[in-house]
Image (spheres, rainbow, N blue to C red):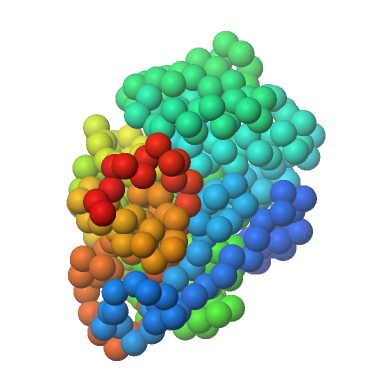
């Protein structure tokens, strides 16, 4: 992240412009559906009205394409890019690289499903799988020795502005939600959605981030009042980067009510319940639902709530990990 970028750089104007870019992107970003919980076969909940944002149906299977569309639109001359990703950013990055004809490499944690590496390679990109703690060192090596340009998968102004289009889209359906629940890894999605909602004037909306207990970097960052790193472990590999982003942290401090934690068992149960209701959602994408279903979000009764299902890239090989 460039030094001069801060939470003050994220203005409503910037986000509205990014939405135009994302909507007109040649990558075909979808305005994903939002469905009322009451019109699904999910177990009933006490909130007045829960809306489920189906970002699992997004192009490339997750919200990441929104931010990537904005990042690539702002680098029209292409380049040789490197990034680090557990899968979904890498997939969106690979899809965009192919479209724009740029070369690239994705550095992945060795815990990410192998099927994700194979898919990224099928778009013509290189993949290097390394221990989570080495991700940044390998990226730095690519920048210094191979002259690649680093595109960050969560700590980047263009990316976060692109993700904010999701928040703006939510407000087109629910103009002033009481509560918005968003999962959090490095914090790019949460930061973008929270900034979009608050800068649009929804002062009373409570926005919660959801992290796995074993990968709670933003939760710890809120306590320590600085972005922290930790040795992360979770079935939700997309929510388990080793550190919280600086810009996401600043934006979350400003716009997010709190971070709640869910266990891997809560996440597994959520994947299974959603699947039975006909919704294919991966572990990371299920965390917001898991938090609501396991009563981790305070004071939901009678409220208008938005729950974001952020991704649906669940391989057939992974399905066996979840309870019946
Ligand atoms: C499905 C899904 N949801 C959420 C996240 C977390 O996004 P962020 O790192 O912007 O917090 C990821 C990250 O890879 C993801 O793949």
Q: Quadrant of the C terminus?
A: bottom left
Horizontal relation, residue 169 to residue 320: left or right: right
The residue that appears at 28% across and 68% down in the rendered structure is 292
Q: Does residue 201 appear in this view? A: no
x, y percent for residue 87? 48, 37
Residue situated in front as seen by the camera: 149 or 58: 58
x, y percent for residue 265? 20, 51
Residue situated in front as seen by the camera: 116 or 324: 324
Residue situated in front as seen by the camera: 75 or 37: 37
Question: Outermost residue, front direction?
Answer: 324
x, y percent for residue 66? 60, 53
x, y percent for residue 113? 41, 32
Horizontal relation, residue 148 to residue 226: left or right: right
Q: Does residue 264 appear in this view? A: yes
Residue 50's quadrant in the figure?
bottom left
Horizontal relation, residue 29 to residue 174: left or right: right
| Vertical placement of residue 24 versus 152, above or below | below
Q: How many marks?
A: 0
The residue that appears at 37% across and 74% down in the rendered structure is 41
Residue 163's quadrant in the figure?
bottom right
The residue that appears at 40% across and 50% down in the rendered structure is 282
| Vertical placement of residue 226 versus 230, above or below | below
Residue situated in front as seen by the camera: 316 or 167: 316
The residue that appears at 26% across and 83% down in the rendered structure is 46
């Amino acid at each position: 992240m460039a030094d001069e970028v801060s939470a003050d750089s994220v203005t409503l104007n910037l986000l509205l412009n990014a939405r135009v870019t994302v909507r007109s992107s040649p990558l075909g970003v979808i305005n994903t559906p939002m469905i009322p919980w009451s019109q699904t076969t999910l177990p009933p909940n006490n909130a007045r009205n829960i809306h489920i944002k189906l970002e699992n149906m997004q192009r490339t299977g997750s919200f990441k394409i929104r931010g990537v569309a904005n990042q690539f639109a702002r680098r029209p001359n292409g380049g040789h890019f490197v990034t680090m990703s557990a899968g979904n950013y890498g997939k969106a990055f690979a899809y965009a690289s192919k479209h724009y004809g740029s070369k690239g490499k994705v550095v992945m944690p060795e815990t990410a499903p192998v099927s994700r590496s194979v898919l990224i390679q099928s778009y013509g990109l290189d993949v290097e799988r390394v221990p989570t703690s080495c991700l940044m060192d390998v990226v730095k090596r690519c920048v210094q020795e191979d002259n690649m340009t680093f595109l960050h998968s969560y700590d980047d102004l263009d990316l976060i502005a692109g993700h904010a289009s999701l928040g703006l889209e939510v407000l087109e359906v629910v103009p002033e939600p009481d509560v918005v629940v968003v999962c959090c890894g490095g914090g790019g999605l949460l930061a973008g959605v929270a900034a979009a909602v608050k800068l649009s004037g929804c002062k009373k909306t409570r926005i919660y981030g959801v992290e796995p207990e074993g990968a709670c970097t933003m939760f710890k960052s809120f306590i320590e009042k600085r972005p922290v790193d930790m040795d992360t472990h979770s079935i939700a590999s997309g929510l388990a980067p080793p550190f919280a982003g600086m810009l996401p942290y600043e934006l979350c401090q400003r716009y997010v009510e709190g971070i709640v934690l869910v266990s891997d068992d809560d996440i597994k149960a959520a994947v299974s319940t959603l699947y039975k209701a006909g919704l294919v959602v991966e572990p990371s994408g299920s965390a917001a639902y898991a938090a609501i279903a396991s009563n981790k979000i305070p004071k939901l009764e009678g409220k208008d709530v938005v729950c974001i299902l952020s991704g649906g890239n669940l391989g057939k090989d992974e399905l066996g990990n979840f309870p019946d």
